[in-house]
Image (cartoon, rainbow, N blue to C red):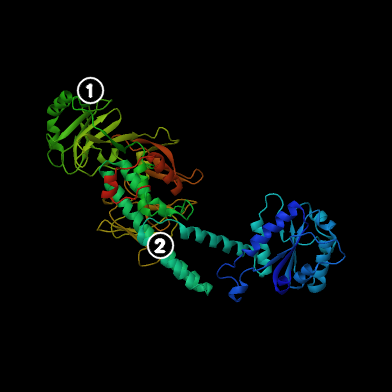
Amino acid sequence: MAEQRMFHYDAFISYRHADLDKAAAVGLHRRLESFRMPAGLRTDLPEEKRRIQRVFRDQDELPLSSNLSDAIENALRNTDWLIVIATPRFPQSKWCAKEIERFTELYGQDHILTVLADGTPEESIPEVLRFRQNGAVDEIIADVRGKNSLDEAALRIAARMYDLVPEELKHRVRERRVKRIAAVSAIAAAVLLLFAMYCAAQFNRISTQNDMITAQNAELQEQYQAQKKKYQDSMAATARRLAVAGRRKDALYAACSALDYASGGDTAGQAGISAALQECLTSLTGVYDRNALVLEDIVPAPSLEDESFWQWERREELQEEYSWLGYYLPEPVIWNWDISELEDGKLLFAEAGTEEFNLYLFDPDQGFLDDVTFLWFSDPPTMPVETALYRDGKFYLGIRSLERDQMACYAWKSIESYEKAGEVRRDKIPQVQLPIIENGQEKLSGDGRYRISPQKDYSLRIYEGDQEMPVRILYELEGIENGIFAMEPLEGTDHYVIIGDTLHSWLLNRDMEIIARVPGYFGYDPERRALIQWEAPKDLDTDVFTLFYCPLRSEKELIEEAEKILGNYTPSGRTLERFRIRSGG
């Protein structure tokens, strides 16, 4: 006890030696002595004062005497703050009252902090403290009754001791905790890991001034975001390569492997998914594609002996009977196609064995031949197709890049399960009503904030306000050669839609980046938070289209859809190595 007389205490905890009271006192004691001031707060204090170094808590009952012990007396003389653990038992202790009385004699009551641990303020706070302020019950610095947090109480006490705003201190402590968690998180890319370690070291060395810390942190975040976007864009490109080869699940796996880099935002931004990756996921999941053939996955090819599937004899008869149709195509095609019969008697002619895949619908009764390649497929295959067959609502393609015993299966994604929004005549859809914006012309967006201007090189420039430099130039918009009609905001969101031809409209994010292709766009319902699309026709001889609601997907919902389709699937080791995909993504 002699050594204690030399100590100076930051705080003295006064409490009754009962189980609940003691538990609160011990918990606060540990938390206060482990408190460290977050960087950037009270930089005017020397380093040794930026933490609570010593807190006095008497661990023994006071002896049965009329005076406080020497240890208690010396601790009260050498402490800055008195912390009272108020419970219904506290006012019954004359020693606790003496501690308050002695501290008040030495320093007054401005540095007495009350923590309510049990009971009500009226029965737990001594009268000497209860009416300090204008006859009102004394301010309670913290309430730790029930499930209320001791951590919260310790922070509120520290805030008072250091003359800080409690909410600001809590925010800084939470921010520091998040940064610590982020610092130990595993980052797969070695370059990013080394870079983060370097930045963490730099951050610790230059933490003397808050403005310098803030500036550097912003710079590091910008560089991290750039690296994250670069990696996600790379995986999006890899996923696209796999998708055009018919390997949907491999493509989804590649896209999802980049999602570890998407933490830290809300889901409209939660995910922090790059625009290219989000567009890739919307395409692979087909969330905005309805009444279209959507890539399902690779399936084993039927045996050549399975005549019920292939129907060789019937296909040869049809090829011979309709060989003359080959001369009606842009380049005469006679024998390098496959023919399938549909349920309604119409015929499908799939041009196979060429560098480009094309699909034609022929009505023998009407004698009408339609090119339905883009009309039917949500995302037509671009790899060379060697054989094609339509059976039971699914389209099977033998793609040259696949093994001989494999076929890519495209399943029909119908709108029947979606809520209908009415019907519309062909002459009422935006792509028919609106005039085409000619090359070099400009047109304001629906809210007047942006200007769009198509160019002769088939790019689209987007300007904000009266600025002369575009905020975005969009290249290689599929279908742009058929015209651009308008740019409309989606009410209540930060999204816009660029209305293109009947098959191509594009959903943009706040940075004017494409995040989805929306075929058959008709409008937007803000109350339902849903796009309104019109049904893509099975042929071109349709004048009335069904309208339906398609909910606008958040990034979180998009990720959940992708992971649901993916399930527990993992590509082969050869695929992971060849396309440099992180396993376990």
Question: Judging from the image, what secondary structure is the residue with disc 1 in?
Answer: helix
| Whether residue 505 is visible | no
Image x and y of residue 350, in percent: 20, 35
Q: Which residue is mark 1?
A: 308
Identify which amino acid the numbered label 2 is placed on.
Answer: Tyr
Report whether 172 appears left or right of 560: right
- Image: 40 above or below 178: below
Q: In the rendered view of the protein, which quadrant contains the N terminus?
A: bottom right
Q: How many marks?
A: 2
Q: Which residue is mark 2?
A: 224
For residue 293, what is the image quadrant? top left
Image x and y of residue 540, in percent: 28, 36
For residue 117, what is the image quadrant? bottom right
Mark sitting earlier along the chain (1/2): 2
Taking the spot 77% from the left edge, 73% from the top edge, the residue there is: 77
In this view of the protein, which residue sits in the foreground, 383 or 405?
405
Taking the spot 77% from the left edge, 68% from the top edge, the residue there is: 71
